[in-house]
Image (cartoon, helix red, strand yellow):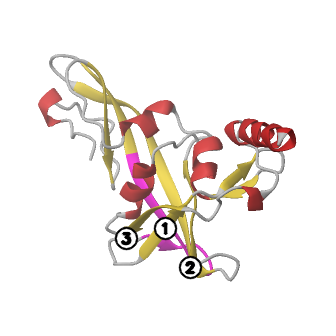
Amino acid sequence: MCTRIILGLVASIMLSAGVVTEASAYPVNEILRREHDACGRQAVLRRGYWDTASQRGFGFDKMYHKHNLKRPEVFAYVLRNPNCGKPAGGNTRKYNAYAHHFECSIFSCKIVDRRQVFLLIDYRRDPGIPGQKGAITAYCDKGVRCPDWVDQSINVLRSGDGPRTAWSYEPMSQQRKYKPEAVPAAL
């Protein structure tokens, strides 16, 4: 009994630190979300895992621990890109979307940062898991970890003075000034 409690505590500490050493002891194949892309292909977001020591993993845990994308809504939004993604080798497709960070005053808003967010989906049927592999990872174009505002902006409506965010499937002009009421709300 005492051994089980100690093992449970060790596993909890390792999982909360983003380190998984034995994938079979963790629900890597748990499906967190199912969505369809714009062309009707169904994709899944599995729990997956991320092992910082080996720099290996896939799924939501890799998005979360390696790339700082902590909301499954990122997976859903990027997957729905009207271009249906682009082939990325084998049965994998690469989808993209843009996150824009605005700074606003009473009179205007301007884009102060923009990140392209990529999503890799492996549509191959894997004999080791039930169904397709699904989301391998999602990440930003500049650096390994996405800034906090990228993840926090999806599906959040912000208004008033100060920072605002918006997502789109095409980059918005950084040269243009936007009226505060014209800054698109996060979808």
Q: Residue at x 52, y 43 (%)?
A: 69
Residue carrying label 1: 44
Q: Are marks 2 and 1 in contact (CB under 8 Å)?
A: yes
Mark 3 crowdedness (10 Å alpha carbons): few <14, some 14-19, many ≥20? some
Mark 2 crowdedness (10 Å alpha carbons): few <14, some 14-19, many ≥20? few
Residue carrying label 2: 131
Q: Residue at x 50, y 56 (%)?
A: 118
Q: Are marks 3 and 1 in contact (CB under 8 Å)?
A: no
Q: Up-down: is 82 above or below 5?
A: below
Q: Up-down: is 34 above or below 146?
A: below
Closer to us: 101 or 92: 92
Q: Position of residue 185 (x, y in %)?
A: 22, 39
How far is mark 3 from mark 2, CA to CA? 17 Å
Closer to us: 158 or 170: 158
Q: Is residue 95 magenta?
A: yes
Residue carrying label 3: 37
Q: Amino acid at mark 3?
A: Asp
Q: Amino acid at mark 1?
A: Val
Q: Position of residue 111 (x, y in %)?
A: 33, 32
Q: In the displayed structure, does residue 179 sit left or right of residue 88?
A: left
Q: Which segment did they paint magenta?
A: 85-98
Q: Amino acid at mark 2?
A: Gly
Q: Earlier in the sequence, mark 3 or mark 2?
A: 3
Q: Earlier in the sequence, mark 2 or mark 1?
A: 1
